[in-house]
Amino acid sequence: MPSALSTFPGGKGNEGDLLVIVGPTAVGKTALSLDLAEKFRGEIVSGDSMQVYRYMDIGTAKASPAERERASHHLIDLVDPDYPFSLDEFQHRAQRAIREIQHRGHLPIMVGGTGLYIQSVTHGYRLPGVKEDPEFRRRMQRLADEKGNEALHRRLREVDEATAARLHPNDRRRIIRSLEIYRATGQPPRFQQRAQTSYNSCWIGLTMPRELLYERVEQRVDRMIEEGLVEEVVSLRERGYRGDLVSMQALGYKEIAMVLDREITQEEAVQLIKRRTRKFAKRQLSWFRRLKMIHWFDVTKPHFEEEIRKLVAGNFPRYKE
C-alpha cells in the first residue's frame, strides 16, 4: 500500500494550475509568495495548520494587514481557537479555495510549512472514514489523565512510529484519533491515504545553511516577543481558551502560558521556544526533502529570486503580468 510519503512528479492535470511554496519556518516563504503573487496574478492559500485560528496572529506568523493588502489570502482566521479543526476540513476548504481562485483566472499559490496538510490537498489523500468511538476516547482520556500524555503517546508509538514522531505528546486529540483509526482498521492512518494529483503543479522549496536558518529562527522568536506574543496569550486566556486545546499547544503559546502560570521565567520560555522551533524547522526540512518534485533554492545565493520567477513563468506563462 502507498504511504503518506509517496511522491509523484509535478505535471499536467485536469484540476488546473497550482504553485506550491514550502520550506522551514523563518526561511522567507511569505516574502517570496507576495512577490510572485504580484507578478503572476496570484492569490495565496495558507498551508499552515495553526493560521486557521482567529486571535493567534503573532505566534503563528500570519501575514500582516499590509501584506494581505498586496495579495488575497485564504485559509487564515477561519475558526475560533476552541474549534476542533481537522485535516479533513482543511483539505476540503483548501481545495475549494483553489477552485475559486482558478475560476477568477488567477494563480493559486499554496504556501506553508505543514507538510501533511499541504500534501493532503496536492496528493488528494483519501482520509480514513472511521467514525468516532466515544467510549474508546473516554478510555484514552482517562489513561492520559492518570498516567500522563507520554503514556498515550507511547501507545501510539508502539503501533505507528511515523505518526508518533510527527505528533507532540501533548496533542491528545490527534493522538487519540490516530489510535482510534488503528483500532478500527488495524493499520496506521497513513496507510489509508492514496497519493494522487491532477493539478498542473510546480513546487518550490526554500532553504539556507542550517546555522543561518537557526539564527533567523532565534531572531524571529525575539521579534515575536517584542511584537506582543505574551500579551496575545494573555488575551486568549481572557477569552477563555484553555491550555489543553490543540491551538494552545502551538509553539510559543504553550511556553508563554507556562510563564503566566509561574512555572518558568520569560527568559526560560524564550530559550525553550527557540530550541523547540529549531527542532521543528529540522523536522520540516526532513519531511520536504523526501518529495522529489520540489525545485530547491538556497535563499542566500545571488539571483535566486530571478531564477524562481523564470521557473514560474515557464510553468505558468499565461499569468505573467
Image (cartoon, rainbow, N blue to C red):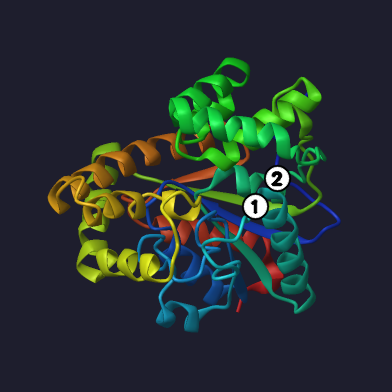
Secondary element type, mark 1: strand
- Picture coordinates of residue 95, whole percent (x, y): 74, 60
Q: Which residue is painted at 43% across and 57% down in the image? A: 242
Q: Residues within 10 Å of mark 1 (few under 14, many from 20)?
A: many
User: Along the line of sight, which residue is nearer the eye, 277 or 298?
Assistant: 277
Q: Which residue was labeled with disc 1?
A: 202
Q: Which residue type does callout 2 highlight?
A: Gly
Q: Is residue 311 left or right of residue 26?
A: right
Q: Is residue 61 left or right of residue 80?
A: left
Residue closest to the far top: 158
Q: Which residue is painted at 74% across and 27% down in the image? A: 191
Q: Which residue was labeled with disc 2?
A: 10
> What is the quadrant of the N terminus in the image?
top right
Q: Which residue is painted at 39% across and 63% down in the image? A: 61
- Picture coordinates of residue 8, whole percent (x, y): 72, 36
- Tags 2 and 1 in contact by the CB under 8 Å rule? yes
Residue closest to the far right: 14
Q: Is residue 40 left or right of residue 62?
A: right
